Each structure stands twice: as structure tokens, then as C-alpha cells.
Image (cartoon, coloured by chain):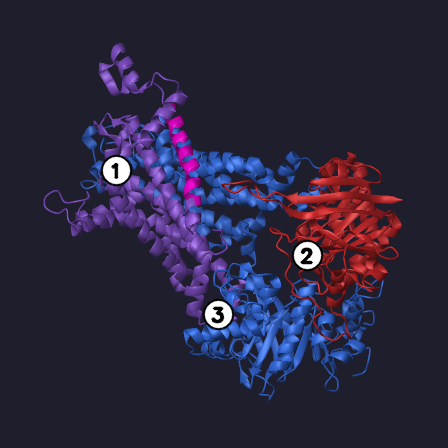
Amino acid sequence: MNRFLKLLFRNRLAAMGFVVLGLILLAVILTPILPLQDPYTTELGARFKGPFEDGHILGTDHLGRDQLSRLLWGTQLSLMVGFAAALMAAAIGSTIGVIAGYFGGRVDNVIMRAVDIVMAFPYILLALAIVAALGPGLLNALIAIAAVNVPFFARNIRGIVVTLAGREFVDAARLSGMSNTRIIITEIVPNVLPVIVIAMSTTIGWMILETAGLSFLGLGSQPPQADLGSMLGEARAALITHPFTSVVPGVMIFLIVMSINLLGDGVRDALDPRLKSGALSRPLPVTTVKRDGPIPAETDDLLAVQDLHTQFHAGNRVFRAVGGVSLSVRPGECLGVIGESGSGKSVTALSITRLVASPPGIITGGAVRFQGRDMIGASYEDLRQIRGDKVAYIFQDPLSTLHPLYRIGEQLAEAIRVHHKVGKEDLRQRAIALLKDVRIPNAESRIDTYPHEMSGGMRQRVGIAMALANEPEVIIADEPTTALDVTVQAQILALLNDLRQEKGLAIVFITHDFGVVAQLCDRVAVMYAGRIVETGPTGQILDTPAHPYTKRLIACVPELGQGKRVLAAIPGLPPVVDDLPPGCAFAPRCDKAQPACSERDIPLAGQAPRAVRCIYPEEAV
Amino acid sequence: MGSYILKRLLSAIPVILGITVIVFLIMSLIPGDPATAILGSYATPENVAKINKDLGLDKPMVARYFIWLGNMLTGDFGRSFSLNRPVIDEVLERFNATLILAGTSFVLCAILGILAGTISAARQYGFADKAITFTVLIGISVPSFFLGMMMILVFAVDLRWLPVSGMYAIYGGGDLPDLIRHLIMPATALAAVATGVVARLSRAAMLEVLRQDYIRTARAKGVPERRVIMGHALRAAMVSIIPVLGLQAGFVLSGAVYIEIVFQWPGIGRMLVDAILQRDILLVQGGVVFVAACYVLFNIAVDVAQSLLDPRIKT
Amino acid sequence: MVALDVENLSKTFPRARPLFGAAPPGVRAVRPMSFDVEHGETLGIVGESGCGKSTLARMLVGLLAPSEGEIQIDGQSPGKGDPAEFGKLIQYVFQDPNSSLNPRKTIKQVMEAPLKHLYQMPSAQRDDRIREIFATVSLRESFLERYPHEFSGGQAQRIGIARALAADPRIIVLDEPVSALDVSVQAQVLNLLADLKTRLGLTYLFISHDLAVVEAVSDRVMVLYFGSVVEIGRADSIFAHPRHPYTKLLADSAPVVGRPLTAPEQKGTELPDPLDPPPGCAFAGRCPKATDICRTDEPELRDMGEDQRAACHHPIDP
């Protein structure tokens, strides 16, 4: 709760809304005891007095009634009606939604059909029909507004509950012997409650507005009782001659609704867990760079990553995802970068052309040089020209990385068109040729299909074709086969290997799988906690790993053909990179660790082509 | 495509039937009998019985529903006693005026809303974003009827730029420029809230889409950022914006009721409010069913647009 | 003795009836299959996406009512699709450890549920039992007051295992229990599972797409393709001497250090369309050995050598 309030008030607008609404609420609560004039006493001699005339702070209305008193009593009425309508709609709508979503099937079908029909009305028609039937009056207006909002809650909550009901913890609860009623109460409802609160807080202002609207039309509160809407409605007749009488209730409605909206948005942001990490920020076209240190000197490698530092800033925490990584590839070479989740391998790959999502990512040091040119300091346009033309990417999940609404031919053609002027027909021919290159059967017809019409393996072939579109010098493959079935993976890897040999490509291959590295890569770099702990030719590393982490990680990997056995494990967990221990990050899990391991930074050392970041290596290199 | 449209049209039949049932049920809740309301002080028992028989009110409810439904299918929505003319004539005439007003507002809110939302998302936390977010917040918080009244004060009374109310000038006028001059204020006031809502949702949809992997793919391909935003991202965001537009059409149609009152626009909303206050039930029934049915058809058009945009929807 | 006996179990998901005409035939996620598992045995179940392994698992624990067939656990047949009846006999460990724990419940509340609802155990006894189980899976008792988001994947999976153990089942279905975990943590969980099995005399059904992991933990392995069992045999020999071409394809596809990178022999990678299944053997379209009979007659599972059964018209010579 404290955390929630802190988050809420960090949002200045929400705090402002809270203050305004608080003041209004305070005034409303104090209304009965304030020395106000009677809101119903008419005094025809004192009609349309201006502000501060004859002791009427806000003047009088067309019947000479005190505006301030009417305003406060009217506000009280409007607020109560609005809240009541919101509560009613939320309670009834959410119940319907939970039942429909949880039970699914026929129950769901019948309920949602009915909801659809109610939603097929422009909502005011329904409200008008209800008021027509029940007769004008504030209570009837309240019922009408609540009723037309029920389907909104029902549909929203149902959507959430359908997802929840399919979650594994609900299955687990069933297997624990819990009944449906109990599952709904203890498993489902606590998880939808925040959503209901959010939906309420964002619709309450709307409901106040709507009940005021019905009163404005003369269908809500009936004279002499007045809420803000009917005050405004009554004042309208004298709008041109005495505008002030209209302005008072109008501004009050505006203030109430705006403060509730501000507060509601704040509540939503504070309750929505996705916002806590700042994940709802949209990534900039290039990663932000804040380099303080010296920029490493030029090398003659095709692609060189030099002492790269990439961080993620979330609140007060700084995650050092990449903490000084240096890599290089030569033409035609395949470099494997291997590590577990959180080791920084993917961030390294994305940093190369500054594709790390920013915010929260920031490149804080080092350089990435393509043919000697530094890309970290390059302008957006320079970088854009390299992306996809000289350095291309293949990403992990081909379903989410291809645009769902463009035909694959269009996506391939675009990859070429943004870099080279090519005619329309040529583009199509190029795209077909590319599909043939990646061995897609019936390329001529496949080119006009959408990604969702293809299997995972075919989609990844399209991903590869797109990377090849401009015959790049370097391809960065970020776990390209992880999302695929094993028989498909074998095909994709073989394809990549063939293409590499045919076209002399340099590949940086990011993976967590030693088997894949062994089959595809010439050299390998092992990453742990944002740094390279060991690097060298693949065969040597697999046969004689020098770093204890490498050695023990290889031992963990079960390999086919060794029968039933006990597997080796590494105790403990990889460290979180916002609080790295000094010295070797692996020391706490290492059985060879000595006090010296945790004293100071350990350099990556050894004789080329091998290097290891360890003072007690398994093998001297 | 044709079969998809046909399928959607067929699926609208039960929805429209459901609408008629709901309207009929609500209307039958009305206490007292309509005959007394119609006859007023002439309500002698004989007259009441006669009217009841004329209107078929002496029959059971189910039979009455089917008679009403059958009549509507032949285009007979009954006769409005307060206006003393066929309901359908009045409804069509009034709906035409509403359509001009609501249609203009809808187009305004769609274009401005999506544009504002897109700019806002592309410049998240920048000056444009803050300015738009603030304007939108005011837009969705101010009651449209109050906004309309204030606009009358400023632009019609004070500055005398635009006519105070009505659809056409009483003397002269009646042409398109005259209509447009009368339309500017009500259409803007009506569009304000809807624009705000569309802008907010477009911003949220764009932000959501911009975080997707395929946007990163487009950037990795070297697609210029303007194309990434206006092409890849907006197109994908439209998938979630279009249904919102469908919903907003209902809100614009609803808001038109207030605006028609404020600006004395001779639309169907004003007609309905008057009919309710005069308890002219056939007019209310006919008006509500007609507008709701039109809205259902409009939403089918929205679904069809959606299926054209998104190939993943099975047609 | 047989712990689990499955006879002709199948699941067909009905499809929506179109506006006109009769309902189309349903999607046969699991075709009629029979197998049994001995007490104390681990049966590995492998197959790629769409092979029906998750549907099978959900039927075995009673989360999904089978369309046809019979499940017998320890000689008892629990009611059709009633998880509470199944719960005491068979439990489930889920693939995604974090999504299998309710984010708004403490670990203690999660652990108490099976004790309270399956065994109606009083509070004091529950605490003792939970402490005992936590000691068995080497989890700290201080975890009990915490919420799921505070745990890493490996820890959460241990909690998932502890929850399954709390129901005191004879059989545990492990549905990809380590595929969401990193390699170095994966081995910790696998070793814990092996240890629990010997100590508590459990029987496992271990579902995975990772052949090497399955081989390392299983006694026997069952290979699924397109909803059917294509081969079943001893773990130490089935991949070395596969009789079904699909098993061979799987074994050849696994990346192995030292094996040159060539795509194993197959015609395509496309699965048959479940909405329009081909007649005959489902693998025929990809099979290098397929002949006419494969495209017309569905092969039966039959004995092929010692402890090995395969459904193939042209089995590979051992």
C-alpha cells in the first residue's frame, strides 16, 4: 500500500488531481455544517446577482437562489450519484465478466451474446430508453447510467479472466482439490481486483459526466433538487444574458472530472506492473550513448567490439548488462558468443548497431567499429545506412520479429529498397531469388503470403533471407534457432552454414547451446555476468576449457548417447548485474575460488588465440 | 471478402432482433397505459378501450411484440401522437441532420485523434507529447454541452463569427456554405471528447506497438525512422485503433444528443428527448431501434475495414 | 507392478459448426493410444510442437476429460476429468514455474492448498507437513512467507515440485520441467527430481523436447508424432537404434559436439495440417522411406525386437 501511494504521488499530475479532488470532497463533506444560505429559498427580487453582491459569494440564479449553496449541494449530489453508478456498474459487470470468463463454453457464449447486443446500442439510446420507461428522476438516471456501463465492465473483466483461467496456477489449484467457487474467490478475484479498480478509477469521471448530462437534458434530478447537470441545464436559458450562472456549475463539473481523471490515470499507472520498470517507454531509433572514457583506437578487423559497456537504468538501479566486452570477426569467420540468460550476450549483439531498447538502455563506454568506423558515435543516418546493408540481424522468434500485416515479399523488398534504388519488378525478382537462396519451396507463390501463414521454420528462413537481402558483410544471429523444433533447427543451422561458405559471410552467433556452437563456430567467446570469461578456437575450448565456469557449464550439458546418468550441476545462481561482487563474478559459485579471486578486477589474459579471465585456470593458456 | 461481408450481415440479424426485444421490454416497463398519456384529459373509458384496440394493446405481450416487429419490417413504425405524423418520416428527417453533425465530428475525431496520438507516442515525454497529453486531458474532462455553451458565448455572442444555433439561417441560406457555418461549432464541441479518447488510445497503441520485436526488425533493416513510425508502427497500431473508432462512433452519436439541445440542431437526439418528456412511446421506440440498427451496420463496416487491414482475421 | 495404465486414450477437440452444413470433424490432438508405466519407472515422452504431448499430460492428471479411453492409476480409475480425484494419485509439475504460482499468494498459502482441500488436514499438522516437504526439496522455511515474484526460475520450480509432493501422489507428470531454466540450474532441478524419486518411490512421466535430457533421466522413452505414439522403447537404445524413421530424424537432428553440420535426411519440415489430416502414416510426407502403402494405411504399433515397439510399415533395420 505504501509503495502504491509512493508511486502514485511521484506522478505530479496525479498528486494535483488528488489535491483538487480532496478539496472538493472536503467542501462537500463540510457543506451541511457550513453557514450557507438555503439552496431552495427563492427570492425573485434578487435574480442573477453577480459574484459578491449582497453577500452571495457566487451570486444568484434565475430564481434568486444562492449559487454557492446550490453549487456545493449539487456537487455533493453529483459525486454521490456518479460514485454509486460506478460501483453498481463495476460490481454487476465484473461479476458477469468473472463468471463468463471462468466457466467459458456455453455460459460464456450466452452471456457475451447478450453483452454484445447491449453494446450494440449507442449507449445514450439505451439510457434514454431506460429513463423513458422509468420516468425522469435522479435515481432512474443513476440506474440508466449504471446499466449502460455494465457491459463495458463485463467485457473487460471477462477478457482478463479468460487469460487468468488458462494460467497454470489455476490448473495447479484444481489439482490441489479446490472447488470452482474457491478458485474464483481465492485465485481469480485477487488477480482481477487491480484491473477492476483501474477500470473504475478511469470511468468514474465519465459516469459523473453522464449523469450530469442526463440531468442537463432534464431527465435526471427534478426541481427543486439540483445536481450540477440540472443547474447547468436551468442556467442555459439565460446563457447569453447571464453567462456567469452557467459558468459556475460547468467549471465545477470540469474540475471534478479532470481531477478524477488525473487521479485515475495515476492509479492505473501505479497499479500496472508493466509501468514500474519503465517498460512502457517506447524505444528510441538508436540507443542513447553517454561515453565518458577514451574511445579505443581503430583496428583493421571487419567488425570489432572494443571494451563495450551497456547499462540499463531502472529507477535507482543500474544493471551493468555488458561490462567491457571486446570481440572481433574477420571476413568468412563465425564467432560464437555463448552464455546463460542474463549474461549480456544478446545486449552485446544489439549494441553493435545500437538497437538496444533505450530507454532504459545506455551505452556508456567503448566502441564498435565496422571497417574501422566507430558506430557508437555515428549519426543516426550513418548508422541507418549500415544497418541491414552492411551489418544485418537474424532474431530469435520469427513470429514476433516479422511484421504481421505485411506480405513477406513486401518485407523483403523493403529491406532492399531502403538502401538501393531498384525498380518494382526487379525487387520482386530479387525477393523471389532470396527465398530460393534459403531453400523455400514454391518461392513464387510464397512471396505473397503473410508470416502467420507459414510454419516456424519457414518464417525463420524468411528472416535469414531478409538478412541476406543486401549481401551484408556481417550477420549477427541472436539465438536464431532457440524457438524452433529440433528437426527444424538442424535444417536452419545447416542452411546458415552453407550460406556462410557460399557467400563468405562473417557471422556473430549468439546462443546458449554448446552443441550448436561446436557444429557451427570457428571461435567462441563465453560470457558470464556481462563479461567475456574465456575465448578461443571452438575445439580447444570444448576439449580443454580453461575457465572453471566454462568447464563446469560444459559438464552440465547432457549430450545424446550417454544413457541414464546423474548430471553435473553448478550450485547457486548467476549474479544479478546491478550488484556485482568485486573481482570474479563467478567466484561465489566456484569450487576453486580463493580470497584473491574477489579482491580486484581480473584481466582477460593468455596467448592468442586463447584468453581466460581467471587467476587459477584449469589449463594454462 | 464478399462471403465475409455476407456472414457479418447475417450475424447482425440476431443482434438487431435482440435490440428490438430489449427496447420492447424496456418500453413495456412503463407504468400506466399509453392510451391515457395520448388522450390526456379526453381519457374516458370508452376512448381508452378504443385506442387500446387500435394500438393492439389489448393483446398479450408476445403477440404485441411480433405485431410491432412485423409492422417495422414493412416500414411501418407507427404514428407519433405528439407530432401527428408517421414515426418513420420524422425519424428519417431527423436522422439525416444527426448524421451530418455526428458524421463530421466522427471524421474530425478520427483524423485528429490518430494524428495527435501518433505524434505524442513518437515524441514520448517531449514537448509535443506533453502539450498533446494536456490538451487531451482537458478535452476528455469538459462536458461537451458546457463546451458548446462556452463556444456560443465566445464565437457567436462575443466575436459574432458564427451563428448561435440552428442548422440553416432562417432567412436566406440553406446552401452548403450556410450549413458549414452552422456546423463548425457543434461539430467541434461534439468531437472534442471523442478526439481526446482516440488520441489517448492511439498513443497507448503506438507505444505498445513500438516495443514489439518487428519494429526492432524494421530498424535493423535500416528502414528510416519516419517510415518505421508512419508505416510499420501505425499500420500495426491501427489494428487496435479501428475497433476503438467503432466504439467512438457510438459515443459521438450519443454526445450528439446534448449538442443538438445546446445548438438547437434539428437532430434525432433532440427528438428523442422531447418524445420522452411527452411520453410519445412509439416515437421513442422507433427512433431508438432505427438508430441502433444503423449503428450495428456501421460496426459491420468497421469489422470489414479491420479484416482488410489484418490478414490474420479469417475472412 | 503397473502404476499407470492407459487404454485407448484419445482426445478430439470439436470445431465450430459453420453457418451452413454439418460440423466438420474435430481436431484429433491425441489419437487412441495405450501404454503403461511400472512403479518406480520414469517414462520419457518426446515430440515436437503439435505432437499432442501437453494434451496427453493434461488428460493424465484429470485437467482435461478424454474423448475416449481409460486411465487407471494404481488399479483405481478416478472419475472422468475431476482433478480433485486425480490429485491424490497423480500430480503435475508445470513448464513455466513462475506462471504456475499465483502471484498474489504466499508460498505458504500455495503449499497449504493441497493439504487442506485434498486431505482436510488441520492447521498444526499442515505446518509440520510443509516443513517436512521443504526439508526434502532443500528449500528454506523463510521462503514460506514470501511471494512468487521474489524467486528465480530454479527456486520457483523447486516450489512447484514441493507443491506437487504435498499432495502425496504416486505419480508425477513433469511437463518440460527444466526447459525454462538455464543449463547450470537445469541440472540442479533434474538431480533433485532423481533424488526424490528414489527416496519417495515415485513414478515419473517426463515430457520434454530435449532428447538428451530425456535420455539422461528416463528408463523408457515414448516418441509422439502428430498425436500418435510412433515408437516406444528403452531409453538407452531407442535413440541409438531407432526403428521408426521419425525417431532417427529426431536423434540425428540433436546438435552433438563433434558431429559435422549436415541437415539430416528428410523431405520437408512441414507438419501435416491438423484440420485436414492425411490418410495413412502422418510422417509419410517427410519420410525418406515412404511408399504407397504409407500414404493409405495407418501403421499399427508392433513389437520390433526387445522391448521396442514402433508404428512403421518400413522400419529401419537395427
Across and down, in percent, residue B23 comes to: 38, 30
Q: Nearer the viewer, residue A488 or C104?
A: A488
Within 10 Å of the Cα at label 3, are there few (<14), some (14-19), or many (20+) other Cα atoms?
Answer: many
What subunit carries mark 3?
A: A
Q: Are marks 1 and 3 in contact (CB under 8 Å)?
A: no
Q: Residue at x 56, y 83 (%)?
A: A370
Q: Is residue B35 above or below residue A526?
A: above
The amino acid on which the numbered mark 1 sits, given as a three-letter code, is Leu
Q: Which residue is mark 3?
A: A285
Viewer-side label of 1, 2: 2
Residue receiving disc 1 = B92
Q: Is residue B225 left or right of residue A463?
A: left
Q: Secondary structure at mark 3?
A: loop
Task: Kindly give the residue lying farthest to the top in the view shown.
Answer: B45
Highlighted range, magenta: B7-29
Q: Colour of chain C?
A: red
Q: Main secondary structure of the magenta part?
A: helix
What's the mark number on residue C295?
2
Q: Colour of chain A?
A: blue
SS class, disc 1: helix
Chain letter, colour purple: B
**Can the viewer see residue B285?**
no
